[in-house]
Amino acid sequence: MWSLNKYFKIHPDKFYLNAAIVSYSIWLFTTRPLRTLLKESALASSILLGIAPNFFAGITLVFWLTYGTSSKPLISFAYTVIILAAGEFVQLFMTNHRADWMDIVASALGALLPTVIVSWRSKRQNG
């Protein structure tokens, strides 16, 4: 029988996959639809609305990397921060985008939350 486990080191705990799917859905919602819904409100210029996509991107990537590669929590955290910081760096050279340090901070804080959850679950499952 064909299986992805032959090619990837998939984590057996499906919680990480489910968490990645949910956080990815929230990430997509915060990029455009939420901003469109709130464009007439006082929250439209809120910094929280501006950094929310990066926060949820951090959450999504840590859960996804943990599930897809069975990597340790700190490795997933490090890769997530590097990937999202690289995305901000690339925006320095794009005319229609703006790089922002707060986005990198939001990415790191977002990545920290699932890192703690994954560490806790790993210790609980192994202990």
Image (cartoon, rainbow, N blue to C red):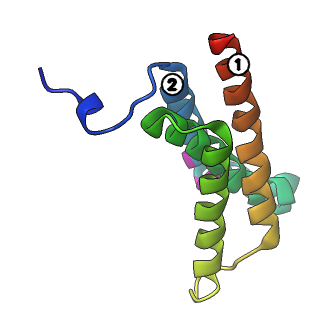
**Residue 118 among magenta residues:** no
Q: Which residue is mark 1?
A: 123
Q: Amino acid at mark 2?
A: Asn
Q: Residue at x 76, y 37 (%)?
A: 113
* Secondary element at tag 1: helix
Judge by depth and name the residue closer to the eye, 53 or 113.
113
| Quadrant, the N terminus | top left
For residue 28, side relative to residue 89 (left or right) = left
Magenta stretch: give its range.
28-32
Label 1 Cα crowd, 10 Å radius (few <14 / some 14-19 / many 20+): few
Residue at the front extreme, as displayed: 127
Res. 18 mark? 2
* Image location (x, y in percent) of residue 55: 72, 50
Quadrant in the rendering for residue 31: bottom right
* Image location (x, y in percent) of residue 4: 26, 32
Dot 1 or dot 2: first in sequence order is: 2
* Secondary element at tag 2: helix
Q: Residue at x 43, y 37 (%)?
A: 68
* Image location (x, y in percent) of residue 15: 54, 20
